[in-house]
Image: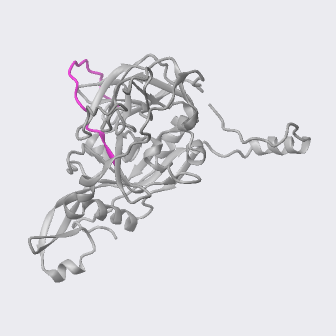
């Protein structure tokens, strides 16, 4: 339960200042913060138009976001702070189901890529997953995949943010889900504190690209949605409502205040080379690793990290934001999110990533999740395929 305190000038604190500070604690800032991504239908439709134009050209051209080209300096120390009893929320579909014993490894359908446009106008992506919520419309990822931490001042939300579960080479088999509202911890929103590097994003109903229609030039000029030309002919994109995210791919459970040392499966789309230049991953398909979280806590002063938990793994950036799942059922492809990949480290300094870390999910994380998981989003495609502009 780390708190970032602002420094007080001088060595003495007056009684009046102390009293004011104590009075202020009764009205302290909340642990959570919210920021709009696409706040209304018109904004959401504009986002869909951008990503689906010319047969999803923007999705195809996006490149993996690399938080840092060199590994941070890690050391053991600090300490995470369970702030209450452990708790869990069941995955979608498991509310009344009995657990199954399975052996094969299957990739969860809930995992996909989050896409956005950065301040330089470049299309970028990282990893995320669908998670249980009342309206089956919630994505969890790293907060640095939602906020522009490279800019000056407080983080600002990234532009044209969408989630595409099961993404593969320009295809969105379950639809494109436009982010509506980002929920994160106040300390990341204001201070860029990576001990709170997680975000819960409510998304609108998905949009499925439903092919194309050849039209006249007049129809083409008057169409405000995605359109393109090919061989001297004019085409417009067709869309239909894909329904709710959780109904289509399910949603992982959620858990907090868990002990370290448990086995976890970590999923994501690694893409970056190792620091020595070797590039074992392409970012085209999701990968997974399995291990037990370490009881050590990893520290990175540049990111204000004092409470991260770690896992020995050779994943590379691109996988950041991917879920850490405990009690994962390979047959059902469901488990409980107990972390998200935040940072990557090279512990033995041999030019190879060998460590991934996650914020520790505690009761404050659970409170933010619960708030986000009870908020409705809505749809942006009408019954006849018209987009609600």
Of residue 104 and residue 56, the one placed in the foreground of this image is 56
Apparent side of residue 217 relative to residue 92 in the rendered image (left or right): left
Here the colouring is one colour
Residue 158, picture quadrant: bottom left
Predominant SS of the magenta segment: loop
The image position of residue 32, as x and y in percent, is 57, 45
Label count reads 0
The quadrant holding residue 222 is bottom left
What x and y, as percent, mark residue 203? 38, 52
Question: Looking at the figure, which quarter contains the N terminus?
Answer: top right
**Front-most of residues 226 and 123:** 123
Give the camera-side residue of 210 and 9.
Answer: 9
The answer to whether residue 115 of the structure is visible from this angle is: yes
Question: In the figure, 203 relative to 259: above or below?
Answer: below
Query: Which residue extends farthest right?
Result: 15
Residue 102 belongs to magenta span: yes
Q: Position of residue 301 (x, y in %)?
A: 58, 33
| Rendered residue at 86%/44% (across/down) | 17
Identify the residue at image location x=56%, y=37%: 302
User: Residue 89 in magenta?
Assistant: no
- 192 vs 36: above or below: above
Q: Is residue 108 visible?
A: no
Residue 96 position in % (x across, y down)? 33, 29
**Is residue 268 shown left or right of residue 258?**
left
- Residue at the spot 39% in from the left edge and 44% down from the top edge: 139
Residue in the image at 57% along x and 25% along y: 80
Left or right of 191, for residue 376: left
Question: What stretch of residues is rendered in magenta?
Answer: 95-114
Q: Is residue 53 above or below residue 19?
A: below
* Front position in the image: 160 or 1: 160
């Amino acid at each position: 339960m780390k708190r970032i305190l602002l420094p007080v000038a001088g060595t003495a604190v007056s009684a009046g200042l102390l009293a004011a500070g104590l009075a202020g604690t009764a009205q302290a800032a909340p642990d959570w913060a919210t920021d709009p991504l696409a706040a209304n239908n018109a904004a959401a439709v504009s986002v869909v138009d951008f990503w689906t134009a010319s047969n999803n050209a923007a999705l195809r051209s996006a490149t993996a976001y690399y938080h840092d080209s060199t590994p941070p300096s890690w050391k053991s120390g600090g300490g995470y702070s369970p702030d209450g009893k452990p708790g869990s929320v069941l995955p979608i579909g498991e509310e009344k189901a009995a657990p199954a014993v399975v052996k094969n490894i299957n990739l969860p359908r809930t995992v996909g890529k989050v896409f956005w446009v950065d301040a330089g106008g470049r299309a970028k992506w990282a990893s995320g997953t669908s998670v249980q919520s009342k309206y089956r419309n919630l994505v969890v990822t790293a907060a640095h995949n939602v906020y522009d931490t490279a800019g000056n001042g407080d983080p600002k939300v990234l532009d044209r943010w969408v989630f595409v579960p099961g993404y593969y080479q320009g295809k969105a088999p379950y639809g494109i889900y436009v982010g509506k509202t980002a929920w994160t911890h106040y300390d990341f929103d204001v201070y860029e504190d990576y001990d709170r590097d997680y975000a819960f994003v409510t998304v609108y109903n998905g949009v499925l690209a439903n092919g194309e229609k050849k039209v006249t030039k007049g129809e083409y000029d008057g169409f405000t949605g995605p359109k393109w030309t090919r061989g001297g002919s004019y085409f417009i994109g067709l869309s239909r409502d894909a329904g709710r995210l959780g109904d289509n791919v399910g949603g992982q459970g959620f858990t907090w205040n868990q002990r370290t040392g448990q086995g976890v499966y970590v999923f994501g789309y690694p893409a970056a080379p190792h620091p020595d230049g070797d590039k074992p991953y392409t970012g085209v398909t999701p990968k997974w690793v399995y291990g037990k979280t370490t009881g050590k806590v990893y520290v990175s002063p540049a990111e204000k990290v004092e409470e991260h938990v770690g896992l020995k793994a050779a994943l590379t950036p691109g996988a950041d934001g991917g879920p850490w799942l405990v009690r994962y059922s390979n047959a059902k492809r469901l488990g409980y999110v107990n972390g998200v990949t935040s940072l990557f480290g090279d512990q033995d300094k041999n030019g190879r990533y060998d460590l991934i870390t996650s914020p520790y999910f505690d009761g404050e994380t659970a409170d933010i999740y619960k708030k986000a998981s009870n908020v409705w989003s809505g749809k942006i495609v009408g019954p006849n395929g018209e987009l609600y502009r």
